[in-house]
Every structure is written in C-alpha cells, then in structure tokens.
Amino acid sequence: MTDAPTTAPVARAATAGEVLAGYLTAQAGVFLRALPQAVGEAGSRPGALPASAQAADDLLRAVRRIGGALHTFGPAFDPVWAQESRTELRWLIDLLTQEPGYRRRSDRLLGAVDSLADTAPDGAGMLAGHPGAPKARALLERQLTLARTRSHTALLQELRSARLHALADRMTLLAGELPLEPEAAAEPAVALLPRTAAALAALVAAAERLPWQRSAQAYAGAGLHRLGAAPADTVPVPRGAGDTADVALAADDAPWLRARILVKRARYALEVCSAPDGELLELDRVLGHHQDASDAAATVAAAARTPRITPATAYVLGVVHADQRLDVEAARYAFGRQWPALAPGLAGPAAVASD
C-alpha cells in the first residue's frame, strides 16, 4: 500500500527550495550527462536510439521527472520560465518516444501476426494457413520500418538543433541557479506535501471516472491464437467505414491514457518527497501496456486503409486489430484488479490538499 506522504522524508531539508533544488539538480545532471551520448548514438544508424539504449533511457527519465516536478510544484518557480521549460521538455519527450514507439509497435504487431498464423497442431491460430497473413505481415513491416526511419531522421536533425542547445542551457541553469520564487522557496519543506497530495487526489478523481463496469471482466484475447483456421474469403469492412470507429476508439481510450499521465505525475511528486511509489510504478506499467496496445491497434487500422490491398489481407489486418483491442481490454481489467487495493492509500492525502 502506498502511504500518504509524511513529513519525515522532507524534514531533513530546511526549506522547500532546498528539496526542489536537490531533486532538480540531480535530474539535470542526468540530463546533461546523457545528452552527449544520446546525440552520438543517434548519429550511427537507424535503430541506434531505441528505448533500450541506456543514454536515451536516462535522458527520457530525467526529462519526464523534471517536467513532472515543474508541473506539480509550479508555484515555487518563476512562472514564465517554468511554462517555457515545460513546453520544451514536452517537445523533447515527444521526439525521444517516437522511434522506440514504432519499434515496440513493430515487435507487437509482427509478433501478433506470427502467433495468430501459427500452424502448430496443438494450438493453431485463428489465421493458421490464411493466404492473407504473409501479405499483411509484409505490409505492416514495410510501413512501420518507413515510419521508424523517418522518425530517426527527424531525431537526428533535432538532437543537433539550436532548440535542443537552448534546452540544454536551461538544464545547466537547473544544475546551478534554480529560478525559484523567493517566498515559496523559503517555506518549510513540508509545504511541498499539499502539492504532492493534490497530484495523488487528481489521480484518484480521474480513476473514479473511468468506466469500470465495462472492464470488470477479463477478455479471453488468447482465444484468437488457437481457434483454428478462418475462412479466406471473408468480406472486409468497406473503405471509410472505419474512420468513425477510429474516432470512437480514440475517445474511449483517452481517459485511460490521461490516467497514465496522472500516475506518472504522482510518482514523480512522491519521488521529490522521497516517499515510496512502488505500487504506482506497477500501475504505470499496466497503463503503458494499455497505451502500447491502443497505439498498435490504431496503426493496424490505418494499414487496413492502404489502397488496393486484397480482401484476404484486409481480413487479416482486421483480426490483428481485434487482437490488439482485446489486449487493451485486458490491460484495463488488470488495472481494475489492482486499483481497489491501492485507492484508499492514495485517497488519504486528499484531505491534506484541501486543508
């Protein structure tokens, strides 16, 4: 159970400014050490900066934590500087996550096609022997490789841009003279606790608004992988008919994607106060799985609108889309299984925020 933030972790520092300066100086140091390595690795070849690259991982973690601290504890900083910094950090997060995101989508979707088309006698997939499976796999691989290459090229350009150099200068300022508001910085360190409690309360409120009744049962998504061969002449959905469905699915996913953002903000706020965040880390992992499946489903839906693909290929893409949407539902179910035990411990700090 995640306990409410206590005064013990922050009491060792005299002021809120000292706590924030110590935390952000450490994160800025990680940023500045990782940046030259990330720039160098990105210049080698496409795929040299995936999510598994240590420098990229360190850089992304630091950027997210700095941005989270600036958001949660915003009143403690110079407002103009804080808003400009958050904008630039968001730009860098979007840039750093594109190529690894395409890599994960490629692994997920190609793996799904291979599993669904598995012809093992003891567990044939729904697409076992289906003539559209090889073409669908090749289409997905081609489109995702192209998208990943383009994102890598964009990354190369931006990692050597004046904009990134300006952001590095901001991080150097963090590691030296943090632009704090004097009055807020001079408050006791425990003054940070209501802001942390507010971040937790925002997560609790967002979770309470999720459509829990629709994720109360697990979906047997694995069944698609062992149902046996499907007919090859199934008629695909007419072109254009999926556009409305895409919009509806994006709207359906949005509250869960928002919940993941709030989980991250709550985690980072607890880090600032040196409070444990292990349960939130697990929630973040589950919601990350949800987002990966949602993104993969959107990618395969777009691939299904490729001009002049055969009905057999379109059918296979439809099955893969359904497989990914089942994974979305499975992640929601997993989140719902964890949340009831966690929510009371997170809701406790809400009273602090309202005092």
Image: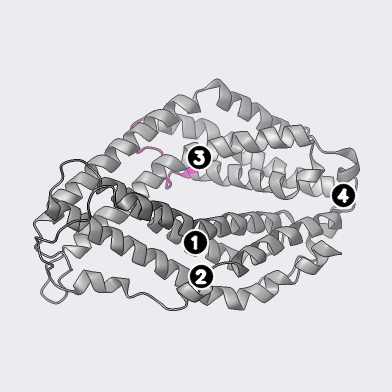
Mark 2 → mark 3, Cα distance in angstroms? 25 Å
Whole-number angstrom distance, CA of label 3 to CA of label 4: 33 Å
Q: CA distance from mark 2 to mark 1?
A: 7 Å
Q: Position of residue 133 (x, y in %)?
A: 15, 55
From the image, state whether disc 4 or disc 2 is nearer to you.
Answer: 2
Q: Nearer the viewer, residue 247 or 41?
A: 247
Residue 323 image position (x, y, % from top left): 29, 64
Q: Residues within 10 Å of mark 3 (few under 14, many from 20)?
A: few
The amino acid type of the residue labelled 2 equals Phe
- Mark 1 and mark 3: Cα distance apart in space: 18 Å
Amino acid carrying label 1: it is: Leu
- The first of marks 4 and 1 along the sequence is 4
Q: Which percent across, then down, holds residue 34?
A: 54, 37
The numbered dot on residue 94 is: 3
Looking at the image, residue 75 sits to the left or right of residue 136; the answer is: right
Amino acid carrying mark 3 in the image: Asp
The residue at the point 22 percent across, 52 percent down is 238
Quick one: quadrant of the C terminus?
A: bottom right
Q: Find out whether residue 20 is within the magenta segment.
A: no
For disc 4, the neighbor class at 10 Å (few under 14, some 14 to 19, many from 20) is many
Return the residue at label 2: 335
Camera-side residue: 79 or 274?
79
Instruction: Inspect the image, locate mark 4, and give the three-letter code of the amino acid beneath it.
Output: Thr
Residue designated by label 1: 287
Side of 262 where 322 appears, left or right: left
Determine if the magenta segment contains residue 52.
yes
Q: Are marks 2 and 1 in contact (CB under 8 Å)?
A: yes
- Secondary structure beneath dot 2 equals helix
**Magenta span of residues:** 44-56
Badge number at residue 15: 4
